[in-house]
Image: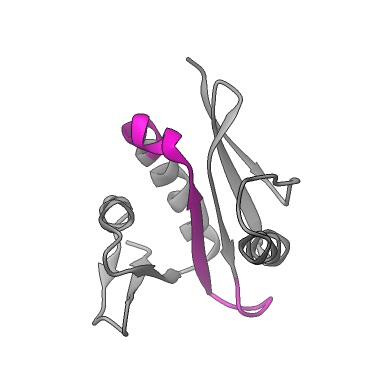
């Protein structure tokens, strides 16, 4: 089994996502400062990236898309994403975002990355990851 994480400015992304979700994913990839793709045996496991609100911003918005492969290899991806967060925090002082309040796997991943959660906003739970 070969697990790898690749950082790029953008790649083509093909999936079984709905056309609306595909548009959102394309937008996230296009707006991102950098995008990380996780693969297991050359099969896509996850994609995440950061979007700064401005070119001079010290904060970036984190987004993530996962497939079922992440569940099977969660510890390897947590370790790789922890390293990626270290790199991001060298470029930005804080990373912010939202996850769904009932997305237990996402909340667990974010906790491993050092996220602190705010108060729920409807179905969304805001988080922040700060440089230590």
Residue at 31%, 85% (x, y): give it: 121
Q: Is residue 58 left or right of residue 120?
A: right
| Residue 17 to residue 30: above or below | above
Q: Which residues are magenta?
A: 52-77
Q: Is residue 30 above or below residue 12?
A: below
Residue most toward the top? 1
Q: Is residue 63 magenta?
A: yes
- 96 vs 107, left or right, is right
Q: Position of residue 105 (x, y in %)?
A: 29, 51
Image location (x, y in percent) of residue 3: 50, 25
Colouring scheme, one of rainbow, by chain, secondary structure, one colour? one colour
* Image quadrant occupied by the C terminus: bottom left
Q: Does 82 appear above or below 58?
A: above
Quadrant position of residue 126 = bottom left
Q: Position of residue 103 (x, y in %)?
A: 30, 60
Relative to 32, is 117 on the left or the right? Answer: left
Total of numbered circles in the picture? 0
Q: Residue at x 28, y 69 (%)?
A: 101
Membership of 48 in magenta stretch = no
Tell me if residue 24 comes above or below residue 36 in the rendering. below
Q: Residue at x 33, y 55 (%)?
A: 106
List x then y, in percent, for residue 81: 43, 44
Q: Residue at x 61, y 79 (%)?
A: 53
**71 displayed left or right of 43:** left
């Amino acid at each position: 089994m070969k697990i790898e994480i690749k950082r790029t400015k953008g790649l083509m992304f093909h999936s079984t996502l709905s056309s609306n979700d595909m548009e959102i994913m394309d937008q996230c990839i296009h707006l991102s400062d950098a995008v990380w793709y996780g693969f297991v045996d050359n099969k896509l496991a996850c994609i995440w990236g950061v979007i700064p609100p401005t070119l001079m911003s010290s904060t970036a918005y984190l987004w993530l898309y996962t497939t079922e492969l992440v569940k099977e290899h969660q510890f390897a991806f947590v370790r790789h994403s922890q390293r990626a967060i270290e790199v991001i925090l060298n470029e930005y002082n804080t990373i912010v975002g939202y996850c769904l309040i009932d997305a237990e796997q996402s909340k667990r991943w974010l906790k491993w990355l050092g996220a602190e959660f705010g108060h729920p906003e409807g179905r969304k739970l805001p988080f922040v990851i700060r440089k230590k």
